[in-house]
Amino acid sequence: MAGPRLRTREPRLSHNVYVVALDPAVLRIRRFRARNPGYKAGMPCVYVGMTGLPPGERFQNHKAGVKANWYVRKFGTGLLPELFAHLNPMPYAAAQAMERDLADELQEKGYAVWQA
């Protein structure tokens, strides 16, 4: 007699990574510059995050001070969907890994990146 069949659930595609453009004035902050020693002058400054919300809603929350990253609240100018839209949505664990990977990839290209 066989035991009960275990159902394997597909992971829910519930999370998104996102990239926020930051005003280049953020480069005046020593802590931000120190995190980006390979920054190439003229390349974008960005914040990379992940969320269970639509990226546009999450950006508005940052700007309103809701669970906000200080750099995004002060210097965020908008989303850069061309850098992330093709990646979304994904399961939570994949989004955690992708947030780090995307931040690393952009930094390697010379972007100034903040990722919490």
Image (tube, rainbow, N blue to C red):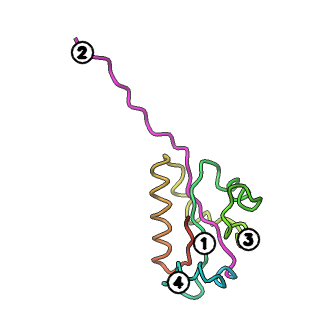
Element at label 1: strand
Which numbered tag is attached to residue 74? Answer: 3
Q: Is residue 90 left or right of residue 75?
A: left
Which numbered tag is attached to residue 39? Answer: 4
Q: Earlier in the sequence, mark 1 or mark 2?
A: 2
Q: Is residue 20 magenta?
A: yes
Q: CA distance from mark 3 to mark 2?
A: 60 Å
**Do the numbered discs 3 and 2 sit on residues whose CB atoms are within 8 Å?**
no
Q: CA distance from mark 1 to mark 3?
A: 12 Å
Q: Earlier in the sequence, mark 1 or mark 3?
A: 1
Which residue is tagged 2? Answer: 2
- Residue drawn at x 24%, y 15% is 2
- Residue drawn at x 48%, y 46% is 91
Give the extent of the magenta segment. 1-24
Q: Is residue 64 left or right of residue 28?
A: right
Q: CA distance from mark 4 to mark 1?
A: 11 Å
Q: Earlier in the sequence, mark 2 or mark 4?
A: 2
Amino acid bearing label 2: Ala
Image quadrant occupied by the C terminus: bottom right
Q: Is residue 90 magenta?
A: no
**Do the numbered discs 4 and 1 sit on residues whose CB atoms are within 8 Å?**
no
Image quadrant occupied by the N terminus: top left
Amino acid bearing label 4: Tyr
81 is higher (above) or lower (below) than 37: above
Type of secondary structure dominating the magenta stretch: loop
